[in-house]
Image (spheres, rainbow, N blue to C red):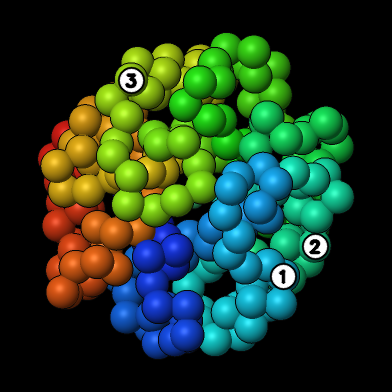
Amino acid sequence: MAVQISPSILAADFARLADEAAAVPNADWLHVDVMDYHFVPNLTLGLPVVEALRKATATPLDCHLMIAEPDRWAPSYAEAGAGSVTIHAEASKAPVRTLREIRSLGARAGLALNPATAVEPYEDLLSEVDMLLLMTVEPGFGGQKFLDMVLPKVRRARALIERHGGRIWLQVDGGVDAETIGRCAEAGADVFVAGSAVYGASDPVAAIDNLRAAAIRQSA
Ligand code: DX5
Ligand code: ZN
């Protein structure tokens, strides 16, 4: 299990996104939170910004679609050059089709679950998925408090993934910082989204190094 850190640009300065991407050269991914005022009560950015960001940085884009119609829009994010496109299970009406489309366009396909959504009903979908994202806050806003209640699900998801060959990445997103990341890693997560803990730090590069070291220390 290789630890990866995906800083969320939701906590960056939206007027200077190219500079903010360049400020985290040690990031494995840039996490891009797409919100549409429908699936979540917030609005962020969409395809034109993802296309522009793609040209402005070599860091692969990890697009997290918190939108009401992922089946309609997710393939466009793969076409725009995102390295990974994650849709929410709660919003998708045809996840098999959409996940296959994402993959056929050359991106990794991710499936996200809100804190109250159980992982077990999605076991049969794991063959269609490259990454499982478990939300550790209710989606919609950065800077929220980490929900420890999700940790047992992280453990159960890791066990399911191992039963299916261990190929799938397990991402956690929301309230991940130097204090909470160890618990996530210990429970079996291997890809860590961090917004405020990276872009709210005076030294984002050092913040990523610290998060990575803390996760590696606790990794199973
Ligand atoms: C929340 C987003 C997260 C958010 C995380 O809906 O999906 O990616 O940016 O921000 P922090 O790390 O500040 O909780
Ligand atoms: Zn996110």
Distance between the Cα atoms at labels 3 and 1? 33 Å
| Residue 190, placed above or below residue 6 | above
Earlier in the chain: of badge 3 and badge 1, it is 1
Distance between the Cα atoms at labels 2 and 3? 34 Å
Q: Which residue is mark 3?
A: 149
Q: Which residue is mark 2?
A: 76
**Label disc, if present, on residue 47 of the rendered structure:** 1
Disc 1 marks a residue whose amino acid type is Leu
| Residue 129, placed above or below residue 23 | above
Q: Residue at x 46, y 36 (%)?
A: 138
Is the CB–ligand 1 distance for label 3 below 8 Å? no
Q: Is residue 178 visible?
A: yes
Disc 2 marks a residue whose amino acid type is Ser
Q: Residue at x 53, y 68 (%)?
A: 60
The picture places residue 65, in percent across and down from the top left corner, at: 64, 51
Q: Would you say the residues marked 2 and 3 are in contact, meaning their CB atoms lie under 8 Å apart? A: no
Disc 3 marks a residue whose amino acid type is Met
